[in-house]
Amino acid sequence: MILLTGGGTGGHLFPALAVAEELRRRGHPVFYLGAEGGLEARLLPKTPIPHALIPAGKLDRSAMRPQEAPKVLQGVLRAQALLRRLRPKAVLSTGGYAGFPGGMAASLLGIPLLLHEQNARLGLANRALAPLAKGLALSVPLALPAPLARKARVVGYPVREVRYPKDEAKRRLGFDPQRPLLLVLGGSQGSLELNERLPPVLKGLPVQVLHQVGERWVERFRPLEGEGYRVEGFVDTPLAMSAADLLLSRAGAGTLAEAAFHGLPAILFPLSPKLDGGAQVANARAYAQAGGAVLGAWDRLSSQILEALEDLEARRRAMARLSPEGAAARLADLLEAFL
């Protein structure tokens, strides 16, 4: 058995689920260890993957949170008990606060631990676990101290490698296959800024819109719905990206990797560097330089959308060249080497 852990948010959860699918396809039993209250608590019951949820204190690099320390300790102890019972041959942690207890427990029990980092710098949980891990898998090349660099390998960002024919996907979602579809994503939790600022612009354009507002904002923004404008709390990303012709979104690493896999051009509104240290701005610029995306400008967004729709094929090709296809298989290969 291989145990996977990590989550709290979609950026950490979805790569692990992609690897779980690949491992199951290869015949390996898998088990998922997630955090109580994380996104995985809602999504894992909808999958065939056996799983458990444990406390996981939220580590925060910007502020001390003494009240979270007991949850971290409780989570590690619960994870140790679970790993002793399941006796996995290897553990993959994709980071986030949900990935720390299982990763630490694996290290304490001498179980081979592989970490996967999605971003252009090590997250707090992975930074703490990296010296203890047997391997470190990266989505993009990182400058690392020599002891970590020796066990690091760039594998890419695992995504669910599922595509649907565009017309079929549009029909399944209830949209007209003959009209362009814009997909709006604000990350797994939604984005209040995009939810408030985009609809007035989009409703004036000859397009259909599928707008993921986030579960907590659904009722507030449900009145936006009308002919060709759909509001959802959460969408099936492979189906939605297969159907869409253009993406309007933040610039999280996971969203961009999935868009690249689907060859889906994007107009990006990255988070302020004050909120994430500039990671999303760097992501957005990299995809823009490759020709698959542009940085959104509120004062001329309508024209940006129309220009993108007129030049879709070239932008699709540019985006597809950035595809992380095969990343889940490469991570599965690393895990099999530990068995």
Image (spheres, helix red, strand yellow):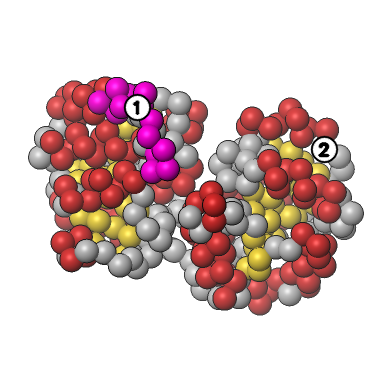
Q: Position of residue 62 (x, y in %)?
A: 42, 43
Q: x%, y% of residue 263?
A: 58, 65
User: Could you tell me which residue is drawn at 18 percent across and 28 percent down?
Assistant: 80
Instruction: Describe residue 172's horizontal placement relative to residue 114 as left or right.
Output: right
| Residue 272: mark in rendering | none
Question: What residue is disc 2 on?
Answer: 225
Residue 235, percent from left and from top:
62, 41
**Mark 2 burial class by Cα count in 10 Å: few <14, some 14-19, many 20+:** some
Label 2: which secondary element: loop
Question: Which stretch did the figure color magenta?
Answer: 60-73
Provide the secondary structure element on which disc 1 rests.
helix
Please provide percent x and percent y for residue 267. 67, 62
In this image, 177 relative to 81: left or right?
right
Amino acid type shown at disc 1 = Pro
Q: Label 2 vs label 1: CA separation?
A: 43 Å
Q: Earlier in the sequence, mark 2 or mark 1?
A: 1
Q: Name the residue carrying label 1.
A: 66
Q: Amino acid at mark 2?
A: Glu
Front-most of residues 223 and 260 = 223
Q: Residues within 10 Å of mark 1 (few under 14, many from 20)?
A: few
Q: Nearer the viewer, residue 46 or 296?
A: 296
Question: In the image, which is nearer the foreground, mark 2 or mark 1?
Answer: 1
Left or right: residue 327 compared with residue 310: left
- Write down the quadrant of residue 16 in the picture: top left
Q: Is residue 186 visible?
A: yes
> Is 239 situated above or below 37?
below
Examine the structure image and report whether residue 37 is included in the region drawn in magenta.
no
At 66% from the left edge and 66% from the top edge, which residue is drawn?
A: 295
**Looking at the rendering, which quadrant does residue 207 occupy?**
bottom right
